[in-house]
Amino acid sequence: MLPLTWPLSAAIGVLFAITAHVADWPVAKGGSRAIPGALSSYFRSLGGRIETGRRIERLGQLPDARVVLFDTSPEQLARIAGEALPAGYRRRLARYRYGPGVFKVDWALDGPIPWRDPTCREASTVHVGGTLEELCASESDMYHGRLSERPFLILCQQSEVDPTRAPEGRHTGYAYCHVPHGSTVDRSDAIERQIERFAPGFRDRILARHAMNTADFERYNPNYRGGAITGGVADALQLWNRPVTRLDPYSTPNPRLFICSAATPPGGGVHGQCGYWAARSALKRLGIADAQPSGRESVTVPVT
Ligand SMILES: Cc1cc2nc3c(=O)[nH]c(=O)nc-3n(C[C@H](O)[C@H](O)[C@H](O)COP(=O)(O)OP(=O)(O)OC[C@H]3O[C@@H](n4cnc5c(N)ncnc54)[C@H](O)[C@@H]3O)c2cc1C
């Protein structure tokens, strides 16, 4: 079933991504950490054990298990597994394209963002781009290795919809723009100038800022190769053929090893589909072919 059903699921994932941009974009109450918090508490309730804070560099660091699922980039899978994977498969993983990175700034603000158009305050996420031509020019610049003077921004103003994020009267926000793969140029000023165009007085409201370039992102999470935060290029060639072209892309030539990250279909996002289909593939390998969700899997995640 797997090869036939995952394209449908992937299409749903893409559809979600598109509709989320034209309707409400959900924000987890208390911050995105509430999502792994809810999932891990459910996993623990089933007897699962989680260990964090340890970087895995080689397969020998992992406990002996019948199957291992890598929530990693293809580059990490190849490096950590080493000769447990055939050289040909590792070469194909090395050809995976990660695409552009991001530069991100987080702010503590002493008031809401003073949008010229007050309806902007009603959205948790605002796409800041001026005209369509400007937006296309910004993305095209980045794609061709240039930095845009008027970068297209994805801006979140979480405290507008989730008051737990900031003390009363204060606000939080972040914005990021795409930058060429691996660029470490500081884009804070360009990002703030772009917001200032549509929200005059924004800069006067900044109490503190924290910026991350592509190298910071990769240090924070080694999956973010060159600052690519959504698991690698998702163009016509790589959206379905990720991490390599293979009937069951979650499996590897080693029957014990699987990959379940955003570098598998249907790609980046917090939809959980990559892990779901990778788990189905692993269960099938273990001879539990018809593992269906039982309904007990439902987890309550507070979303505002
Ligand atoms: C700022 C930002 C905003 C985003 N906004 C959205 C959004 O609005 N909507 C959306 O759908 N998606 C969004 N995304 C993208 C989304 O978060 C990712 O696509 C998704 O989390 C990828 O999931 P994953 O399972 O592949 O890996 P990850 O979420 O990267 O999880 C992998 C985990 O494994 C750990 N790890 C990696 N390598 C090792 C190692 N060698 N040893 C030990 N641990 C390791 C990492 O530290 C991490 O904790 C955003 C991402 C960022 C950074």
Image (cartoon, helix red, strand yellow):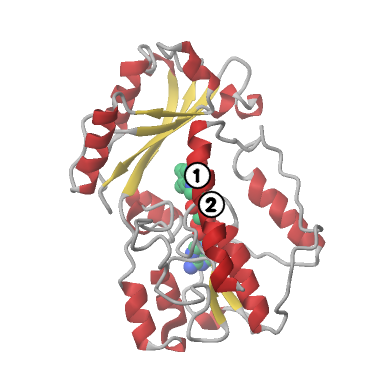
Residue 105: quadrant of the picture: top left
Reading the image, the residue beneath label 1 is 17
x, y (%) of residue 226? 32, 56
Q: Quadrant of residue 302?
A: top right
Task: Establish if 100 lies above or below 28.
Answer: below
Q: Which residue is at a point 50% across and 44% down the rendered structure image?
A: 17
Tell me if the residue at label 2 has its CB under 8 Å from ligand 1: no
Q: CA distance from mark 2 to mark 1?
A: 6 Å
Q: Are marks 2 and 1 in contact (CB under 8 Å)?
A: yes
Q: Which residue occupies 34% across, 77% down? A: 92
On the question of residue 65 being in view, the answer is no
- Judge whether 250 appears above or below 265 on screen: below
Q: Nearer the viewer, residue 82 or 100?
A: 100
Q: Which mark is residue 13?
A: 2
Q: Position of residue 238 (x, y in %)?
A: 37, 63
Give the crowd class for mark 1: few <14, some 14-19, many >=20 residues within 10 Å. Answer: some
> Which label belongs to residue 79?
none
Q: Quadrant of the C terminus?
A: top right
On the question of residue 52 being in view, the answer is yes
59 or 8, nearer to the observer: 8
Whether ligand 1 has any atom under 8 Å from the Cβ at mark 1 is answered as yes
Crowd around label 2: few <14 · some 14–19 · many ≥20 (10 Å): many
Q: Amino acid at mark 1?
A: Ala
Circle 2: element type: helix
Question: Where 43 falls versus 171 (above or below)?
Answer: below
The residue type indicated by label 2 comes to Gly
Instruction: Count numbered badges in the picture.
Output: 2
